[in-house]
Image (spheres, grey):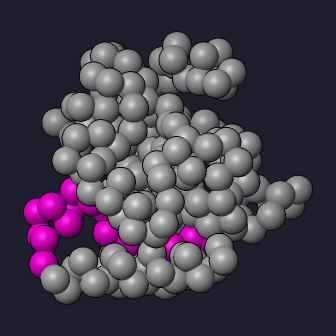
Amino acid sequence: EELDLNEVRGCTKCVLCENRTQTVFGEGDAEAKIMFIGEGPGQREDESGRPFVGRAGALLEKEIAAMGLQRSQVYIANAVKCRPPNNRTPAPTEVAACSPFLQRQIQIIRPTVIITLGGPAAKLLLDIREGITRARGKWFTYDGLMPEGPQIPVMPTFHPAYLLRSYTAENRRRVWSDLQKVMERVG
């Protein structure tokens, strides 16, 4: 809360601050074992100040419930804290401006596992080049807290908004498989 109040809400490090209604810091359990990280807030998130609301948020909540958890038991954040215009992918300079905030969120939460939602979030957090179709379902490691902090296992999966656009049985099975791997890892 202190990071959000004192640094994020007044941030003007990139052009995204010019059109935001409000920042979208993140929410959930500060001691969560599982942290979900998306790309950036959309219009509904910008209006509410909460990550993953609307249709994609409702689907994410169903996924969390299928894992036997409630939204309040995980932590949900985005790579950038302000809405990119027209929900475009955040530019590298915008991500760079917000990356210290996300890194500090990860450092504070210290989750057992991170789940990235969508290709852009996986690429931003893991610095990988492969697309989400190839990356999803494979374990990666976030080592941004090294040398003081732990390495954190990361499972990339499809973004809920993608599933809403391509709601096939195969895509649902793929996401469920990814989430099952996370549940096994967390115990």
Q: Is residue 166 magenta?
A: yes
Find the magenta span and give its range.
153-168
**Quadrant of res 49:** top left
**As displayed, is residue 130 above or below residue 144?**
below
- Residue furthest front in the image: 68
**Quadrant of res 19:** top left
- Residue furthest right in the image: 148
Q: Quadrant of the C terminus?
A: bottom right
Q: Is residue 126 visible?
A: yes
Would you say 67 lies left or right of 113 here?
left
Would you say 163 lies left or right of 159 here?
left
Residue in front for this viewpoint, 64 or 137? 64
Q: Residue at x 65, y 59 (%)?
A: 33
Residue in front for this viewpoint, 33 or 128? 33
Q: Residue at x 52, y 44 (%)?
A: 72
Q: Quadrant of the N terminus?
A: top right
Q: Is residue 61 magenta?
A: no
**As displayed, is residue 165 above or below residue 31?**
below
Image position, residue 21 (x, y; %): 31, 16
Image position, residue 4 (x, y; %): 59, 24
Q: Residue at x 30, y 39 (%)?
A: 53
Q: Residue at x 67, y 42 (%)?
A: 30
Image position, residue 83 (x, y; %): 31, 32
**As displayed, is residue 174 above or below residue 153?**
below
Would you say 183 lies left or right of 81 here?
right
Residue in front for this viewpoint, 143 or 63? 63
Image position, residue 8 (x, y; %): 55, 23
